[in-house]
Amino acid sequence: MKVLFLCGGHGKRMLPLTDNKFLLKFLGRTLLEHQMQIAVDAGLMNFILVCNPQSYEQVKTIAEKFNSATIEIAIQEKPLGIANALESAAPLIKEELMIVNPNDIFDITAYTSLLKSHQHDKSVSEILGYRVKNYFPGGYLITNNNGDLTGIVEKPGAGNEPSDMVNMLVHLHSNPKALLQYITKVETEKDDKYERALDAMCKDGILIHVVPYSEAWCAIKYPWNVLESVRYFLDHTESYISPTAQISNRAVIEGKVIIGDNAKVLENAVIRGPVYIGPGTIIGNSTLVRAYSHIGANCVVGFASEIKGSYVGDNSWFHMNYVGDSVLGEQCNFGAGTITANWRFDKKIISVRVNGNPTNTGMDKFGAVIGNNCRTGINVSIMPGVKIGSNSIIGPSVCLTEDVESDTIVKLSASIRHIRKKFNPRQNKEEPF
Amino acid sequence: MKVLFLCGGHGKRMLPLTDNKFLLKFLGRTLLEHQMQIAVDAGLMNFILVCNPQSYEQVKTIAEKFNSATIEIAIQEKPLGIANALESAAPLIKEELMIVNPNDIFDITAYTSLLKSHQHDKSVSEILGYRVKNYFPGGYLITNNNGDLTGIVEKPGAGNEPSDMVNMLVHLHSNPKALLQYITKVETEKDDKYERALDAMCKDGILIHVVPYSEAWCAIKYPWNVLESVRYFLDHTESYISPTAQISNRAVIEGKVIIGDNAKVLENAVIRGPVYIGPGTIIGNSTLVRAYSHIGANCVVGFASEIKGSYVGDNSWFHMNYVGDSVLGEQCNFGAGTITANWRFDKKIISVRVNGNPTNTGMDKFGAVIGNNCRTGINVSIMPGVKIGSNSIIGPSVCLTEDVESDTIVKLSASIRHIRKKFNPRQNKEEPF
Amino acid sequence: MKVLFLCGGHGKRMLPLTDNKFLLKFLGRTLLEHQMQIAVDAGLMNFILVCNPQSYEQVKTIAEKFNSATIEIAIQEKPLGIANALESAAPLIKEELMIVNPNDIFDITAYTSLLKSHQHDKSVSEILGYRVKNYFPGGYLITNNNGDLTGIVEKPGAGNEPSDMVNMLVHLHSNPKALLQYITKVETEKDDKYERALDAMCKDGILIHVVPYSEAWCAIKYPWNVLESVRYFLDHTESYISPTAQISNRAVIEGKVIIGDNAKVLENAVIRGPVYIGPGTIIGNSTLVRAYSHIGANCVVGFASEIKGSYVGDNSWFHMNYVGDSVLGEQCNFGAGTITANWRFDKKIISVRVNGNPTNTGMDKFGAVIGNNCRTGINVSIMPGVKIGSNSIIGPSVCLTEDVESDTIVKLSASIRHIRKKFNPRQNKEEPF
């Protein structure tokens, strides 16, 4: 059985973070590596990685880390959806095929329950279903009394749900070649060709069994989902402090903490887990890291900073900052006094513009989303829910209330020049202020 | 003997703090409770509380705490002064009556010296006098050689003082019904009817003996008097750390400190007394509280903040702030980087606008006066002597140089929008700043 | 042999720091004292101090500290260069004379190597030469095969250097009276009269031997050279903590540190040497001083501040500040939240305006240059390379991007007033931000 990972799409809703979501790093490894490792742990050893041309090199590098597995790579030229991904990988698809969306985070039981169910009758396909309490913008699964699929309805809209079971993209196809034929026959301009093919198959009487799954599931669709993912990974790992990490005996380490090789924690720093500190990262004097924070490799969290509930990419630098409930890419550098605000005065839920539309994060504490290679000046204020595109610069003293595109400089306008006037400090007669 | 506490006035000069000054809390109890307790300690057991309609419920609740005392409550419909307060309570006034202004803070000796003097001749009334060195805007007492009152002059103005003895409102009347009759006869539109009645009485030959008092006296008239009151209470209490308080062994506690039940002091915090920390309050990592600070109940003084010489009401939150020589109400919430400036560049005495008039605080270090339920954004600067009315919001990055009314939002104006321009970070040819 | 120290010039390029560079204090003593001490250590005991009228009193006070030496003071009325300085001191000049620029910092070997060479033939003059790799804006020495001077070319410009040996102003003249006569004969309006005299002398066949020197040499010409001087002095001294200094056992002291009498280091402070802390200075709670910082006497580095790689004059106060790679005079006072930026977004070398011309500091990390008696408000941002003249005030919330003259106030202009609007906090219907 081969496992096909869908790495060919572009997650535009994730911008300014990487649109190749499976390349996001957690606990020092990309999301794709985590997914492949779970599959390996479930006894699966043959992988097809369908990637886009942009991520090919990175995917190849990841593949090379899995020596004991057999890995094939297919390139999907354009992000035209799952059906197109399968078509791109068609020559590699033989008999049984597991299709997996690596941008969903789930437990190993997703695989094992599917495989176990598959033991009963290897001619039946198996797909994973997740019972939801509230509306979820995905595909709803309709089943008969035997738990076999009778139809799929994509994003029916709240109130129109045909069931409470949504489609999780961990699908085991017993006859993937038949699936490909069905795909060929679907006529649509939309990107739900794959789901329509499944719908057509089950309506033709092909058995597709729905296996319920009720463990952890975290779908990374929006930048703030990264914070939920950090929670997942920190909750599902053990404390570990590398023997090469240098922890001052005047530092405080509390709770579940993972500290990488050669990291340093200086005097009077406090790390209150669950927290991940990547290899080579320095946590400076009088600095506080807490509440499900995830700091990448080779960062410097300098003097008197606080990182709370945030995700920070590799090689980022801080100094006298507050980073709260924020998601930052790699190689960011904050000037001293830069602060991310993380709640509204009216304490309402914070929304973030995604493709131009205000989108509810569901969180009343949320900070900024900042792409790679951004720099801020000193005493910068960044409002809740603001996004800053990669390679952008926010000048000193700016109070940033709106999103910033990539490759952009934001600075105070000339209209706020200062008044200068002479006074006599010896007489000190005039009131200076 | 009954003790009548004058709780019916409205201290407008205290705004945006409570105008019912006797409801200000020190060491976890209202000022009125402190005053009643001192009276109880002096052996007095019968109280009349004259309150305004607005404070009736709170006064009743306070009264219920004194089980062993007999307490009657009278309502003064309008804040028309002492004479009117006495008239409002007339049905409750029988024989000997002590009249006390609970907004003055004084020692138990104020009562005991009055009572002791009263032993000599119970037919003589006794009033307390305080010898001043500088002009004080109160009533000046003129006495004969026997120390008996011969006249009162209200606020004569500096240079016109008829004596150096000012009236302190702890008065023991041997015949309060006669006093009420005198009050009826005074014809004036001003609010000194009571003092005029006393003046008339002594001029009619009724003996009113002036008992000198030279212990601590702190009259709460203006917001900054709250800081003097904090000094008084901290100087007159003992160190106490509740056994239920959780103090990190990496915290530093020094000097006289009172820490309430279930308070928490986290690692690397420094509390340098005299300091009061209310019950349930959390003092965060790397935070400094010092120099006669008084922090109410259930506050959070978060990471890397300093509170110096300030009064903070219950349920207030701080985070990376400096609060210096300031007086804050309840439920205030400061964004990270909000700082109260507490000295002028010219090092002059700081003045505060009271009823529209700049009023000298007598202090060269004084910060802000902030009402209940105020919130500030990140990186806010608040100038010395500024007042912020209750329920107001100061937006991020604002430099506040003027008073703010209640229920008001202050934010940066649209005219300071920022310049945004595209640049090419790869070429990096153009000088970005 | 007399040693003549040239203290008569005005180092305008050093403004807003003292233009009497030899009065800059390092390790608690003026530069001139250091220089005289080195000369004493080299066995020299007779000094002529040529000073300007403005510095006379201070020079006299310094002279009085050297009891065992014989010291004469000459006044140079106007800063007309070395030749004029020698003419001013002519009556005091007898036989052998050493001429020294005290604004150059060098090792004792500068003296000893000159004196040793002089032993061979006391009739020959000896001057110090320093071999450079890159262009240096000084006098280039041309020598013959015997190492004797054949000519001097002042500032030839990069690419036109006649040798790689530059003139260091530690010169031993065997016949200074002849030198004075040569000076008389030079006709020029420029300030290189002394160098022209030397040139003329050697061209007349008078032997002037060039002694190579290759030890430490730090020429103080520009404000940023003060930071190099701090490095020199800290590298050339031993650790010392005064027995009267009070160091909390919760403070961290690391590396080479000199801490003066009665200094205090409070809890959770970290001093990471090489660092100098002057007598009477207080290092506050949670404060960090590091990386070749030099803090004068009686300063207060208050709560949660960081001083990195900076020079700070006496009696300066800080509080919640970051001072990085900066040079500050005496009696400066920073409001909380004032930050000096010390790198450019484009990571280029930082330049400083000197006499109106942008001048390369050679450093990619450099902060501000601030004269004596300056004050900043809260949340002030100061850009890299900015200079602030003495007695100036920078108002709160200002982002300072340009130099400020002395005796000047800079404040936010009226055009950035704030919007105030009423809202109903109870309804909270309207979105406040």
Image: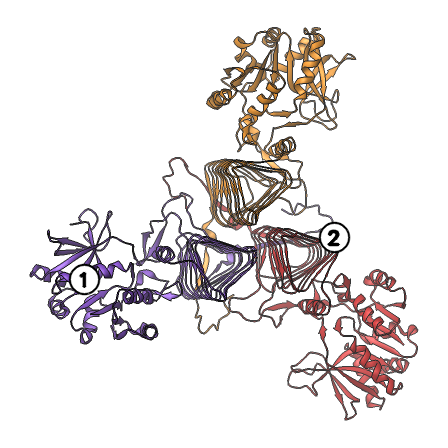
Chain colours: A orange, B red, C purple
Q: Is residue A427 left or right of residue B191?
A: left
Q: Residue furthest left?
A: C204
Q: Which mark is residue C192?
A: 1
The residue at the point 24 percent across, 59 percent down is C110
Q: Position of residue B313 (x, y in %)?
A: 71, 58
Count of numbered circles on the image: 2
Q: Position of residue A391 (x, y in %)?
A: 46, 37
Task: Give me the C-alpha separation between circle 2 and circle 1.
Answer: 77 Å
Question: Is C133 drawn above or below residue A237 in the view shown?
Answer: below
Q: Nearest the camera: C274 or B216? A: C274
The reply to whether residue B187 is in sight is: no
Q: Residue furthest bottom?
A: B145
Q: Amino acid at mark 2?
A: Asn
- Label 2 chain ID: B
- Graded by Cα atoms within 10 Å as few (under 14), some (14 to 19) or many (20 or more), the crowding at tag 1 reads some
The image quadrant that residue B159 belongs to is: bottom right
Q: Nearest the camera: A295 or C16? A: A295
> Which type of secondary structure does the marked residue at label 2 adopt?
loop
Q: Is residue C386 left or right of residue C110?
A: right
The image quadrant that residue A98 belongs to is: top right
Q: Label 2, on which residue?
A: B262
Q: Position of residue C341 (x, y in %)?
A: 45, 51
Q: Position of residue A60 (x, y in %)?
A: 48, 20
Q: Is residue B67 left or right of residue A427?
A: right
> Which type of secondary structure does the marked residue at label 1 adopt?
loop
The reply to whether residue C104 is in sight is: yes
- Graded by Cα atoms within 10 Å as few (under 14), some (14 to 19) or many (20 or more), the crowding at tag 2 reads some
Question: Marks 1 and 2: in contact by CB < 8 Å?
Answer: no
Q: Amino acid at mark 1?
A: Asp
Front tag of 2 and 1: 2
The image quadrant that residue B71 belongs to is: bottom right
